[in-house]
Amino acid sequence: MASVVNDSCIKCLTCVDVCPVGAFVELDTQVVVNPDTCIDCGVCISECPQGAIAADGDADEKWVKFNAEKAAAAG
């Protein structure tokens, strides 16, 4: 399980600041979660002011794929 960011993200970076394992990858207009790094602690979900982050089991499958693909492409 991992957290997933959707298109409500405004790249405020609150999630980046609270993530204990550095699972976020910054894109041009938003961030995504690297599912291989995320430990599913949920801190980012509760701290996101936009409500743009959810557990992958609660997120639309397109966002699960989007996060994984973009994080992998970023290296």
Image (cartoon, grey):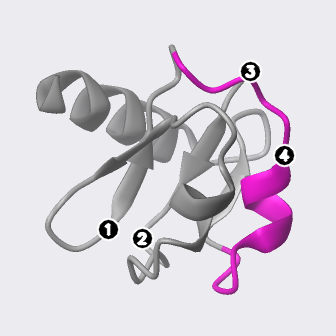
Per the model, the C-alpha gap separating discs 4 and 3 is 10 Å
Of the two numbered discs 2 and 1 on the same chain, state the one appearing first in sequence: 2
When the figure is inspected, residue 6 is found, relative to residue 21, above or below; the finding is below
What is the CA distance from the residue labelled 3 to the residue labelled 1?
Answer: 21 Å
Residue at image coords 54%, 37%: 61
**Would you call the spot at circle 1 few (<14 residues within 10 Å), some (14-19), or many (20 or more)?**
some
Callout 4 secondary element: loop
Q: Quadrant of the C terminus?
A: top left
Three-letter amino acid code of the residue under disc 3? Met
Q: Is residue 10 above or below residue 46?
A: below
Q: Position of residue 17 (x, y in %)?
A: 58, 62
- Place of residue 1 in the rendered image (x, y in percent of width and height, measured from the top left): 74, 20
Which structural element holds mark 2?
loop
Q: Do the residues labelled 2 and 1 touch (CB within 8 Å)?
A: yes
* Residue range highlighted in magenta: 37-51
Q: Which amino acid does label 2 sit on?
A: Asp
- The local secondary structure at tag 3 comes to loop
In terms of secondary structure, what is the magenta stretch mainly?
loop
Of the numbered discs 3 and 1, the one sitting upstream in the chain is 3
Which residue is under mark 1?
Answer: 30
Q: Taking 16 as reference, is 8 above or below it?
A: below
Q: Can residue 48 be found in the magenta stretch?
A: yes
Q: Which amino acid does label 1 sit on?
A: Gln
The residue under label 3 is 1
Question: Which circle, 4 or 3, is nearer the viewer?
Answer: 4
